[in-house]
Amino acid sequence: MCAALIVWSSVFAQYFIMLEGSQLDLLGATVRFFSYFTILTNSLVAIYFTSQLWAKNQDIKSFWGRPGVLTAITVYILVVGIVYQVALRHTWNPEGIARVVDELLHTINPLLVLVFWAVFELKHKIYWTQIYSWLIYPFIYLLFTISKGYYTGFYPYPFVNVSELGYAMVAMNSLILFGAFFGISVGLLMIGRKI
């Protein structure tokens, strides 16, 4: 319950922080908020942790408790954390509560999920072939982001900004990102075989 509360709190806090500084209307600001992979993935984490509290609801529990679901979510949130630390942290300097929320979304929550994965995932029931299905979510996100950016001119991350970088460079950046998704997936499966 504590993990779910932490992640939900960080997502909602970031939403209100963004609303406070946004010049968009409520709908526009909300759409933009959910344009970020960080927000979508932290929301996914929050939903997962919440589902684990509903042990009596076997329909919910059985879906989110399937072997590989937690590993996929762990891959996604680890990519959020790593990409932020490597490519985005230097691009801005939040202060006060914004700094706390930023660290939760990009550092604390990923580590929290990794620890939860290490303890609770059914690692012996995960198969290598599942990795390819785990790539569907980031692939759909990338297509949506580039398509939406084409019409609106807004790209949530500088490394997918076609207007600034062009399609060739964005394609290269995307390959690097998918390499990270794939590499972390392989890494977790290898670690899972040993613990």
Image (cartoon, rainbow, N blue to C red):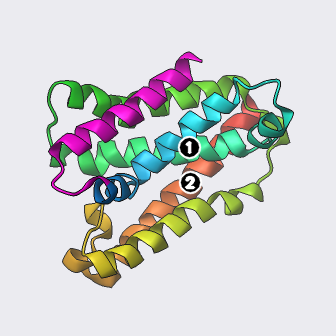
Residue in view at x 16 percent, y 44 percent? 21
* Distance from the alpha carbon under mark 1 to that under mark 2: 21 Å
Q: Percent x, y for residue 12?
A: 38, 34
Q: Percent x, y for residue 121?
A: 73, 32
What is the magenta segment's predominant secondary structure?
helix
Image quarter for residue 168?
bottom left
Secondary structure of residue under mark 2? helix
Question: As drawn, is 57 to the left or to the right of 181?
Answer: right
User: In terms of depth relative to the viewer, which is nearer, 170 or 146?
Assistant: 146
Give the residue pinned by disc 1. Answer: 44
Q: Which residues are magenta?
A: 1-26
| 141 shown above or below 74 | below
Proximity of marks 1 and 2: CB atoms separated by less than 8 Å: no
User: In terms of depth relative to the viewer, which is nearer, 106 or 12?
Assistant: 12
Image quarter for residue 48?
top right
User: Tag on residue 183?
Assistant: 2
Residue in view at x 79 percent, y 24 percent? 55
Residue in view at x 80 percent, y 41 percent? 66
| 123 shown above or below 100 | below
Callout 1 amino acid: Leu
Secondary structure of residue under mark 1? helix
Q: Nearer the viewer, mark 1 or mark 2?
A: 1
User: In terms of depth relative to the viewer, which is nearer, 60 or 174?
Assistant: 60
Q: Percent x, y for residue 41?
A: 50, 46
**Is residue 193 visible in this depiction of the protein?**
yes
Q: Considering only order in the chain, which callout, 2 or 1, is on the residue closer to the N terminus?
A: 1
